[in-house]
């Protein structure tokens, strides 16, 4: 019998390795027993983990798709059909990948609104917020280029419309567009470079996610009360939040699988089952749903250049949000006016999503303009002004204690 | 296709804007009952076989099915020998042989179905300038899918008095713009079914639409079956994770 204090052989090997490369301790500090997290995190805190999980799903399914995909205009569409019909479980890979992009965005958008509501972008988490926004931009580029790959009608025309936007930039616009296209129209060189970049960018995203989590660990997680949390109100990430995340991922997957297996084309466009044809413009060119709010902002403005600036600006403004928001209270729970303003802002984003899918005329165009105007009004005017004027509710001193009554 | 309760629940719960993201087609397409609707939806093999007969006897004169090989028909319940015999009814070009000449031979199960026209120009000139599209994916390439196909084929009517049809065009209630370059194809008893099913026009249109759903989505049955197993497994995992979570959190929620 081994003495209890004596190390087993396995333990010795483990220690030997940890002394040389402490990878297990590293993980334990990142998402394990050594990462203390506030004990009051609600289910909105699940979506970061879920987004990371979807990134892994996208990478695995994507790599197997790439083994069967042919990035040539004359064969891309057929190669995707071959994946659907002849490759073992190819239909599953493709439907998981195509719908996975949608669910990745759903997770990330909820994650972002969580940050907006609980003030996670404020000091000391500004850099963490920036890296998150860079991830969003990289995801958008990845998804846009991925959508071009199957080379259907919407792939081709979507790519044409979006890349043509760059021509609006004075002086260098045409040069940029030619560079993106690799020629003078969306064609074989475009498809080929988009495939190369679509394969590359997810790994850039992995790098950004690493930095995102690094930046998270400096101040630690924010929480629904938005107050700084003392050590006694923290619990180890593992097992408390690992098990909670496992449950959250399970629920999320139920929705994801329901769509993958029973409505795999519901989020897609029927026109993308028609091979790309540069001579025939589809009646109505729409991007994927997760781009619709930005597309609505683009089209709300009659001037092309200003439209492009507004569209990119709508995301870039988010980089300075930590300073546009003049309130030092993080959680909207304690901000009676801002809370409702934020809820209206979310409805505004939903409205823009709807407008983006409609033809830009009549009521949808007007609503789109109102929605776009509100978007900027909210961020540039209402957010700073409300921060100055609003009287916040009293903050609790700690997670455990009820709100202190004002002295009578 | 889109009417599944599960999807509705998924979409709603995730608070996606309820409206379909695509612009609604202005023409309302009534929903039909199909054996492949629903969670365990499957193809009615006899119906799909009848639909193939319609395609073969009517539509194949103008429309190709470029993604379908003869061997694919085994999935519809035809035996290997039947598929071989079916392929042998067709001639395909092969070659070049050792002398460098192209030659004709009987089709094999691994061959794709032959196309009616050698190229697009030929197809257009034979159809008054219009191109009959390939039908392999048509059920996924149009809003309404098989419902649309059924109503399109049955939607021929007299043009309203105030509408002037161009030469060679027909009026169709369901075709976008209502002027279609394909003449009415389906009437009562247009085909005589090998299995004795009564071949009224509705039946024929329904059968060929079901067949085209199969050509567009041949893996639908495995998809539904796999989906059920995956969902049950995920549900078990989620329930277990939930109870484990409660148990672990009970340690700190006591006080
Ligand atoms: C950030 C993660 C990713 C996102 C958001 C994303 C998004 C997309 C989207 C929207 C499509 C079009 C789906 C369709 O309609 O078919 C697509 C296709 C594709 N993606 Fe990705 N992707 C990601 C990661 C990857 C990775 C890591 C690879 C390979 C290394 C990959 C390989 C492919 C291939 C080969 C296709 C074309 C096949 C197809 O159309 O189904 N993707 N991607």
Image (spheres, rainbow, N blue to C red):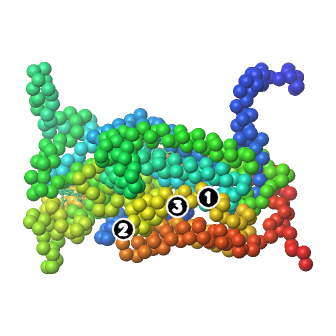
| Rendered image: mark on residue A359 | 2
Subunit ID for the residue under disc 1: A
Q: Is residue B70 left or right of residue A380?
A: left
The residue shown at (9%, 26%) is B101
- Whether labels 1 and 3 belong to a single chain: the reply is yes
Which numbered marker is on residue A190? Answer: none
Contact flag, marks 1 and 3 (Cβ < 8 Å): no
Circle on res. A314:
3
Q: Tag 3: Cα neighbours inside 10 Å, few (<14), some, or many (≥20)?
A: some
Tags 3 and 2 both on a single chain: yes
Q: Which residue is mark 1?
A: A320
Residue at x-position 86% and y-position 22% = A6
Mark 3 vs mark 2, CA separation in Å: 21 Å
* Residue A394 image-quadrant placement: bottom right
Residue at left offset 21%, top offset 59% = B204
């Amino acid at each position: 019998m081994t003495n209890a204090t004596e190390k087993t052989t396995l333990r010795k090997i483990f220690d030997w390795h940890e002394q040389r490369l402490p990878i297990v301790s590293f993980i334990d500090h990142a998402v394990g027993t050594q990462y203390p997290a506030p004990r009051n995190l609600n289910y909105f805190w699940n979506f970061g983990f879920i987004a990371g999980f979807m990134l892994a799903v996208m990478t695995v399914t994507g790599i197997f798709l790439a083994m069967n995909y042919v990035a040539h205009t004359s064969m891309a569409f057929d190669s995707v059909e071959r994946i659907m019909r002849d490759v073992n479980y190819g239909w599953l890979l493709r439907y998981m990948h195509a719908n996975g992009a949608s669910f990745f965005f759903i997770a990330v958008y909820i994650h972002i609104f969580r940050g907006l509501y609980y003030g996670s972008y404020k000091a000391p988490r500004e850099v963490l917020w920036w890296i998150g926004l860079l991830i969003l931009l990289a995801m958008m580029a990845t998804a846009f280029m991925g959508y071009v790959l199957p080379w259907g009608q919407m792939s081709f025309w979507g790519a044409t419309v979006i890349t043509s936007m760059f021509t609006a930039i004075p002086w260098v616009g045409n040069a940029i567009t030619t560079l993106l296209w690799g020629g003078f129209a969306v064609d074989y060189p475009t498809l080929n470079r988009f495939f190369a970049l679509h394969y590359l960018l997810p790994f850039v995203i992995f790098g950004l996610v690493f930095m995102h989590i690094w930046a998270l660990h400096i101040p630690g997680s924010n929480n629904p009360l938005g107050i700084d949390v003392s050590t006694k109100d923290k619990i180890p990430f593992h097992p408390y939040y690992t098990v909670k995340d496992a449950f959250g991922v399970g629920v999320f997957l139920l929705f994801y699988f329901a769509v993958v297996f029973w409505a795999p084309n519901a989020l897609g466009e029927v026109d993308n089952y028609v091979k790309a044809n540069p001579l025939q413009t589809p009646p109505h060119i729409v991007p994927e749903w997760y781009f619709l709010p930005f597309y609505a902002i683009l089209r709300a403005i009659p001037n092309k250049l200003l439209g492009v600036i507004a569209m990119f600006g709508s995301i870039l403004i988010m980089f300075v949000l930590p300073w546009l928001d003049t309130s030092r209270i993080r959680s909207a729970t304690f901000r009676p006016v801002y809370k409702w303003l934020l809820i209206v802002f979310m409805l505004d984003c939903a409205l823009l999503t709807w407008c983006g899918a409609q033809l830009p005329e009549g009521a949808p165009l007007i609503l789109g303009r109102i929605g776009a105007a509100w978007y900027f009004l909210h961020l540039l005017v209402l957010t700073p002004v409300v921060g100055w004027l609003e009287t916040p509710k009293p903050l609790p001193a700690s997670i455990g204690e009820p709100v202190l009554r004002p002295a009578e | 296709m889109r009417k599944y309760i599960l999807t509705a629940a998924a979409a709603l719960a995730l608070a996606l804007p309820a409206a379909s993201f695509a612009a609604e087609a202005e023409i309302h397409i009534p929903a039909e009952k199909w054996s492949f609707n629903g969670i365990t939806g499957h193809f009615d093999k006899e119906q799909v076989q009848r639909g193939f007969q319609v395609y073969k006897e009517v539509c194949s004169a103008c429309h190709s099915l470029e993604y379908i090989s003869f061997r694919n028909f085994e999935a519809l319940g035809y035996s290997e020998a039947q598929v071989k015999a079916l392929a042998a009814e067709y001639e395909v070009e092969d070659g070049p042989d050792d002398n460098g000449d192209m030659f004709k031979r009987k089709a094999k199960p691994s061959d794709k179905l032959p196309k009616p026209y050698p190229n697009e120009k030929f197809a257009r000139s034979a159809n008054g300038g219009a191109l009959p599209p390939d039908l392999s994916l048509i059920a996924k390439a149009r809003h309404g899918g098989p419902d649309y196909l059924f109503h399109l084929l049955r939607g021929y009517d007299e043009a309203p008095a105030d509408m002037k049809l161009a030469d060679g065009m027909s009026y169709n209630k369901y075709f976008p713009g209502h002027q279609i370059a394909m003449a009415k194809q389906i009437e009562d008893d247009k085909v005589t079914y090998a299995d004795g099913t009564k071949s009224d026009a509705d039946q024929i249109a329904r059968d060929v639409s079901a067949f085209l759903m199969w050509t567009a989505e041949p893996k639908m049955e495995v998809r539904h079956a796999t989906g059920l197993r995956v969902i049950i497994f995920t549900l078990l995992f989620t329930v277990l994770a939930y109870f484990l979570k409660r148990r672990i959190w009970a340690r700190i929620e006591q006080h």
